[in-house]
Structure formats: C-alpha cells, structure tokens
DNA sequence: ATCCGGGGTTGGACGGAGTCTAATCCGCAT
DNA sequence: ATGCGGATTAGACTCCGTCCAACCCCGGAT
C-alpha cells in the first residue's frame, strides 16, 4: 500500500495522519495476514526506527475505535488486527495457530437476530481445525 | 457441587483426585459463570488457603486436556473456563464483558463441514451485543 | 516400623503483552 | 520568533501465565 492510500484511509476515518500513524496504517492495511501489535511495531520500526511501542498501541486503538481495522482475540495471548472490516468468519488452524478469513457467504447462520432478550450487534462463526493437504512437516 | 461429585468427575476423566484438584474441580464445575483462572484460584483458596497458583493452572490445564472443561479466549486478556462441554454458542455482553451460553439449537449454521481444503473439528458462533432489558446495574 | 520412589504441590523467579505517565517534541497559527 | 495543543517517547509498571527446583506426601516393599 502506498503512503497516499494510507493517508486517505486515515483521513476517511478522521484520524490525523502523522508520520508514525502513516507507518502503522501502511503496515496494517498492506498485510493480508493478521498481525499482532508487536509484529506491527517491528514492521513500523523498519520505516521509523524510533517509533515507540506506546505510539503503535495508541494508533491501533484509535484505528479500532474509528473502525478502520478490527481487533480479534481468538487464540490465547494474541490480539491480532484485521484490516478486513467486511463481515467474515474465522478459521483457526490448530497446527499453526494462524487465522484465516472465511467469506461471509460461505456459511449460513440463521436465528442470530431473533434471540429473545438479546440485542446482537455483530456475530460470526469461529471454526477450528486443520488444513487438509499441503505441508504437514 | 459436592465433593463426591467432583471426585467422580475427575475420576471419570482419569485425573487423580488430590485435595487440591478436588477444590479446583468443585469451584469450576459448580459455577454457572465463566471464571478466569485467577477467580478460580481465589475461590479454591477459600477451601485450601495454601493452594498455589501453579497448582491451579496445572489442574486447569489437565482438565482441559482431558475434556472435563473447555477454555475460551473470547475477550481481551481473559481466558475463562467453561464447565459446559456440550456444544453451544457464546454471547458476549459488550456492557459487562460477561459471556453467556447460547443453546446449540438456538441457531442454525450451514456449510461448516463443507469448506474445501479445511478439516473443521469444531465451530461455534460468537455473538456480541447487549442484553435488552432487565437488570442494568 | 522404616525406607524409597514418584507423582503432586509449592513459592518464587521469570517472560511477554499491554498500560500508564510525565516529559519532550513537533507543527502550525499568530 | 513564540506559544499552544496534540502527538510521541522512554521507561516503569501491572497482569497473566509459565517454568523450575525443592519439598511433601503416600503407598508399596522390605
């Protein structure tokens, strides 16, 4: 992702684009993986060596708040950030711990909005298992 | 839950019932809430003041391994233990952070077992929102 | 009754992830 | 040039969980 795209994304979500925030946004939005905060910090430091942990955490929190990215807490001890803000499900590979997106319409969920007493704002399916073929080591 | 029930549960899962393990099992199996490890530690200490953190963590890990309980990582920084090992979904109250069980058949999910390339061993729906009325506090 | 072995338990040290704070550093309008 | 407010920084701190070496306890063998 180019800097200008990142700048546009930040501005579209009313986040002032400082150099540090641009670096974080570029890292997060550019990645197809689900990165943890520390991975994002490490990559951002390649662009701005002096960028601090606090800034990265602050920026990520702001981005989550403004719905530019989403945070996921699916596996133990790892909060990861997902630049895909469209609805989708998650598949957790039990071998690698890696998280994969599943397209929303690959599954069908019925009844989520008609649970008595609950006002559901969002939902998704979390699946666990393993990838069938390819590279078992 | 009485001690004998806890003992039976441990033995049914081939876990040797020591006094400490009994205390942990009673706490976990007796609760309808989803307790964190430290909450379990605190309650177990009411019965056995000298019980150590390590023992509680060890016991919980064993219980998870032997499928006596399940561990859930649904909200930030909190691993909780769920004595309900039947399939069910989870609703996270965004106001309180509390986790509620949703009966398996309250929702219908289609397609989870027919995802190409993935061998799904388990899945469930995670919903977020708030409780409509009743007991705000 | 004593010894012995091994699983269970303990406390404390350790590590990683994330938060907080006070001081500093811009960038910008005047 | 100056002053202001938001942004950034480093580092201390907390919380959760893991690891490890020593200790304890108990049942079986002698």
Image: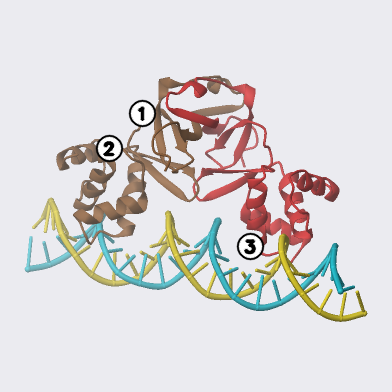
Chain colours: A brown, B red, C yellow, D cyan
Residue lying at 59% horizontally and 42% vertically, measured from the top left? B98
Q: Position of residue B59 (x, y in %)?
A: 67, 55
Q: Which mark is residue A86?
A: 1
The reply, left or right, for residue A51 in relation to residue B11 is left
Q: Do the residues indicated by labels 3 and 1 lie within the same chain of the protein?
A: no
- Asked whether residue B34 appears in the rendered view, the answer is no
- Decide: marks 3, 1 in contact (CB < 8 A)? no
Identify the subunit bearing mark 1.
A
- Dot 1 falls on a residue whose secondary structure is loop
The residue to which callout 3 is attached is B54
Q: Is residue A101 above or below residue B42?
A: above
The reply, left or right, for residue C20 in relation to residue A26 is right
Q: Position of residue D21 (x, y in %)?
A: 59, 75
Within-10-Å neighbours for mark 2: few <14, some 14–19, many 20+: some
What quarter of the picture does the N terminus of chain A occupy?
top left
Number of the front mark, 1 or 2: 1
Number of the front mark, 3 or 2: 3
The residue to which callout 2 is attached is A13
- Dot 2 falls on a residue whose secondary structure is loop
Identify the subunit bearing mark 2.
A
Q: Is residue D2 above or below residue A39?
A: below
Residue lying at 67% horizontally and 45% vertically, measured from the top left? B66
């Amino acid at each position: 992702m180019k800097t200008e795209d990142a700048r546009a994304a930040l501005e579209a979500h009313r986040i002032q684009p400082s150099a540090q925030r641009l670096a974080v946004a570029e890292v997060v939005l550019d990645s197809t993986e689900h990165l943890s905060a520390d991975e994002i910090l490490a990559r951002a430091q390649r662009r701005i060596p002096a960028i601090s942990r606090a800034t990265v955490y602050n920026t990520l929190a702001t981005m989550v708040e403004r719905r530019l990215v989403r945070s996921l807490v699916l596996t133990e001890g790892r909060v990861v950030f997902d630049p895909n803000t469209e609805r989708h499900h998650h598949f957790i590979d039990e071998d690698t711990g890696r998280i994969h997106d599943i397209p929303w319409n690959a599954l069908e969920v019925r009844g989520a909005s008609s649970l008595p007493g609950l006002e559901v704002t969002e939902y998704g399916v979390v699946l666990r298992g393993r990838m069938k073929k390819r590279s078992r080591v």
